[in-house]
Image (spheres, rainbow, N blue to C red):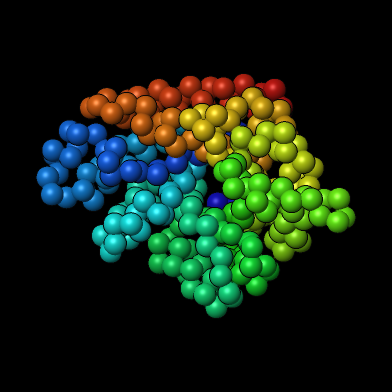
């Protein structure tokens, strides 16, 4: 999906919701575990497929945290591939892998996620510099989503460090990232709970899409994010995971997820109208 196609889809569906499929085996509804005894992978796939089917009308992307699948070993890799295949064509499939290594290793990671698994996008950690990110950018028609400003407590350790030139570390990282990739191939991760800094991120990257986790269960505000970082083309993907996929632990989990996704979509539609 190109940048313009993503913008058009956001306008058409009136949403910029990204649903996070961070499926924890311990939180799969009991009735699914009972339906697939001794096959947790099948239960998870049934859960993921039901969530996707229930929410795809209200979403433009799905973000799959690979750690939840890699922890399952070889079966998790198969499950990851099967989950990606459940995502409809009008939604981006994002693998949240946060990879970043020396060039030839990053090249293999990029092939694994973009070619072997067929994902549309992957998150990367840019700490090792340009040669660790470039192999991902070299894949035409794919999105590289680089960590820029995260919302975890440890982000203070490096990202907020004040440098001699008066900039904070994350600001320099964003400037460098934008010199490596253009808005048609690169997105940035910026946490919603860093609301005061989102305006700074947007000023440094005015035309880039931002993938924004942290809205909902982690305490981030949709209104604050939109106020600080929405552009005329939207240029936002707001990720919500637990608030949607665990809206209910019972047999109605899919309908509860649908209700929550629709609620967020309606709020997003208001912002799209406001900013148009």
Could you tell me which residue is drawn at 34 percent across and 54 percent down?
A: 69
Q: Nearer the viewer, residue 276 or 66?
A: 66
State the residue lying farthest toward the right.
165
Q: Is residue 109 above or below residue 207?
A: below
Is residue 73 at least partly visible in the picture? yes
State the residue lying farthest toward the bottom.
104
Q: Is residue 258 left or right of residue 63?
A: left
Q: Is residue 268 above or below residue 119?
A: above
> In which image quadrant can residue 123 be found?
bottom right
Residue 97 in the image: x percent, y percent?
48, 57
> In which image quadrant can residue 256 be found?
top left
Q: How many marks?
A: 0
Could you tell me which residue is drawn at 65 percent across and 51 percent down?
A: 157
Q: Is residue 33 left or right of residue 63?
A: left
Residue 4 in the image: x percent, y percent?
64, 47
Residue 187 in the image: x percent, y percent?
63, 51
Is residue 207 at least partly visible in the picture? no
Q: Nearer the viewer, residue 104 or 92?
A: 104
Could you tell me which residue is drawn at 29 percent across and 62 percent down?
A: 73
Q: Is residue 189 left or right of residue 70?
A: right
Q: Is residue 271 above or below residue 153?
A: above
The C terminus, quarter of image: top right
Residue 149 in the image: x percent, y percent?
65, 47
């Amino acid at each position: 999906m190109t940048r313009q196609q993503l913008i058009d889809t956001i306008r058409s569906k009136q949403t910029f919701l990204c649903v996070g499929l961070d499926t924890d085996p311990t939180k799969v509804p009991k009735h699914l575990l009972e339906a697939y005894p001794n096959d947790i992978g099948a239960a998870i796939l049934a859960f993921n497929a039901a969530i996707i089917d229930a929410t795809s009308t209200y979403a433009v992307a799905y973000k799959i945290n690979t750690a939840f699948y890699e922890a399952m070993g070889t079966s998790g890799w198969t499950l990851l591939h099967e989950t990606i295949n459940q995502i409809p064509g009008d939604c981006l499939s994002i693998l949240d892998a946060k990879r970043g290594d020396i060039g030839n290793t990053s090249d293999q990671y990029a092939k694994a996620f973009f070619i072997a698994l067929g994902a549309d996008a992957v998150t990367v950690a840019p700490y090792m510099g340009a040669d660790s990110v470039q192999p991902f950018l070299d894949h035409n028609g794919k999105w590289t989503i680089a960590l820029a400003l995260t919302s975890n407590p440890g982000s203070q350790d490096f990202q907020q460090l004040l440098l001699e030139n008066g900039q904070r570390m994350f600001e320099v990282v964003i400037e460098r990232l934008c010199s490596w990739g253009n808005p048609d191939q690169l997105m940035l991760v910026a946490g919603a709970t860093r609301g005061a800094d989102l305006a700074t991120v947007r000023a440094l990257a005015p035309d880039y899409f931002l993938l924004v986790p942290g809205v909902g269960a982690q305490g981030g505000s949709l209104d604050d994010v939109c106020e600080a970082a929405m552009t005329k083309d939207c240029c936002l993907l707001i990720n919500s995971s637990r608030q949607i996929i665990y809206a209910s632990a019972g047999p109605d989990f899919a309908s509860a997820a649908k209700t929550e996704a629709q609620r967020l979509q309606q709020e997003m539609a208001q912002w799209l109208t406001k900013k148009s």
